[in-house]
Structure formats: C-alpha cells, structure tokens
Image (cartoon, rainbow, N blue to C red):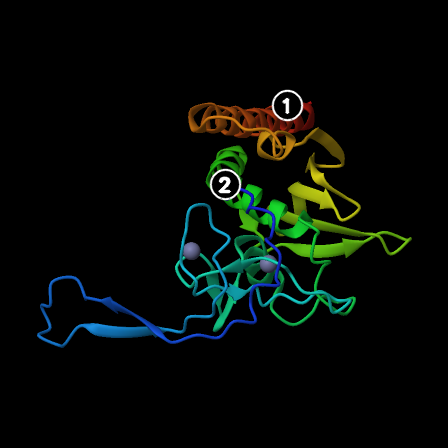
C-alpha cells in the first residue's frame, strides 16, 4: 500500500553537473564466485525528494501527461520506481503500470496531478484477495470469478473520465454480479465502491484526509486498517444481500 509521495521540491537545482559517484553492490554471498556487481549511478546534483535521503543522484520523474506537462518530483534510483527502463515517482509508476506508458483511449496519459488511477490501483490491489475469496464463496455451480488485471478508464456522455477496476462473478450467460472500485478524475480523493447497480460505499481514504497533518505511524496504520475493514464489510454485506434477494 502506498503512502502518498511528498510534494515535489523545486526543480531548479538540476543544472549543476558534477562527477560520477559510484556505488558498489555485492551480490549476496558470492555463491557463484563471480565478482561483485558494479553499479555506476551518475551524480545529477539533484537531491532526492524521499524524506531524509541525501543522495544527489535523483532524476526527475519521467512522467508526461496528455497535455505535455512533467511531474516535478525527483528521486534517486533507490527511491524512484523503474518501469520499462524509465524512472518514475511512486504515484506515476503506478499510473504507467496501470494504463501503459503511452496512452489512454482518449489520447495522452492522465493529468500529472491526478491521483485517480493510482488510487484505484492501490485500493484494488489491497482488496483483491478478499474480494476474490468473497465472490468465490458466493459462487454457485457453473459460476466463476474474473478480475481485471489493471485499472482502466471509462467516460460518461460528457467525456468525463472515471477510473475503475472490477471483479466479476460470471456464468455462461454473462455477468451475474460485478464489484467495482471507482474514482472520478474530477474528484480524485473520493473512492466509490459499486456492487451490482448501486454504490454501496464511498469515502475519502484516511491517508488523503490527513495529508496535511502530521500523525504518528501507529495511528496511520490503524486508520488504514479500519478503512479497508470497512470496505471489506460493505462489500461482504452487499454481496450477501444480492444472494439473499435472488433466492426468493
Ligand atoms: Zn533517495
Ligand atoms: Zn511523478
């Protein structure tokens, strides 16, 4: 589960070019007898945005949105996330993994400051095991569970985007019941959970609510767990209701 990355520092410190710094990484216990791996990380003169990291080997996040705007975050190779050979901040690594590095059906990648796709992706990943288990146990003979591998974008009649990831209970006739995590691009902090045709839960995750505040790690973890527990229970009750009503 991702903590939101720190806001980007100013990108004006990157002009300084300096010498190469070298990091030596030894393979764990050289069982192979091969020499240790030498990784050369160029010193970019840009300070990593990760809290307390003092590496000046940071590179700006490689993300470019559909309007050509860049992300202002910069991370060192240790704290950035590489996707297909490019270094991204955590959020944008999530977006690129979810929708591919090139484009969405509408053209470019989502707006640089929009957290909708990565939020759906994180939450779906954390709920995945439970939702699969829940739908599997609700399945009747001939029914099975299919889950989306990634986030995808859908648009309403006004071309407004919403980001979604779903699990489906299906049989040979089609979809019996669908569970969807959804975040609208225009309101990228509100998570909505659909079961069947209705929204059965919506809320702003606690780590977004208290983004500006300082809080200790223990209460962060507890709040996060409560949030997921609440989502799990809401989905459980909705699936249960669906099955009970269908029985009559
Ligand atoms: Zn770093
Ligand atoms: Zn980024």
Q: How crowded is mark 2: few (under 14 residues within 10 Å), some or many (20 or more)?
A: few
Residue 211: give x, y in percent of width and height.
61, 34
Q: At 56% from the left edge and 63% from the top edge, which residue is drawn?
A: 13
* SS class, disc 1: helix
Residue 34: give x, y in percent of width and height.
13, 77
Q: Residue 194 carries which label?
A: none
Q: In this view, does 30 lie above or below 191?
A: below
Q: In which quarter of the image is residue 33?
A: bottom left
Q: In this view, does 30 lie above or below 113?
A: below
Q: At 50% from the left edge and 63% from the top edge, which residue is drawn?
A: 46
* SS class, disc 2: helix
- Where does label 2 land, which residue? 126
Residue 246: give x, y in percent of width and height.
68, 28
On the question of residue 143 being in view, the answer is no
Q: Residues within 10 Å of mark 1 (few under 14, many from 20)?
A: few
Q: Distance between the residues labelled 2 and 1?
A: 27 Å
- Where does label 1 land, which residue? 244
Q: In which quarter of the image is residue 123?
A: top right
Pick whichever, 43 or 231, lies toward us: 43
Pick whichever, 99 or 234, lies toward us: 99
Considering the image in quadrants, where does the C terminus appear?
Answer: top right
């Amino acid at each position: 589960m991702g903590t939101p990355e720190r806001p980007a520092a100013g990108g004006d410190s990157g002009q300084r070019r300096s010498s190469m710094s070298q990091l030596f990484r030894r393979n764990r216990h050289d069982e192979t007898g091969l020499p240790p791996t030498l990784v050369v990380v160029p010193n970019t003169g840009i300070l990593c945005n990760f809290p307390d990291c003092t590496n000046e080997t940071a590179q700006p996040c490689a993300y470019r949105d559909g309007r050509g705007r860049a992300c202002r975050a910069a991370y060192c190779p240790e704290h950035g996330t590489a996707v297909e050979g490019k270094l991204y901040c955590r959020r944008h690594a999530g977006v690129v993994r979810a929708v591919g590095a090139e484009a969405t059906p509408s053209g470019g990648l989502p707006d640089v400051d929009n957290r909708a796709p990565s939020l759906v992706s994180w939450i779906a990943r954390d709920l995945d095991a439970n939702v699969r288990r829940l739908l599997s146990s609700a399945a009747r003979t001939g029914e099975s569970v299919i889950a989306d591998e990634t986030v995808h974008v859908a648009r309403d009649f006004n071309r407004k985007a919403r980001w979604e990831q779903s699990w489906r209970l299906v049989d040979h006739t089609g979809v019996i019941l669908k569970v969807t995590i959804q975040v609208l691009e225009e309101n990228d902090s509100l998570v909505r959970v659909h079961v069947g045709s209705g929204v059965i839960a919506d809320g702003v995750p606690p780590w977004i609510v208290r983004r500006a505040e300082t809080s200790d790690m223990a209460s962060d973890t507890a709040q996060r767990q409560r949030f997921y527990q609440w989502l799990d229970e809401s989905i459980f009750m909705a699936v249960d209701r669906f099955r009970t009503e269908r029985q009559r």
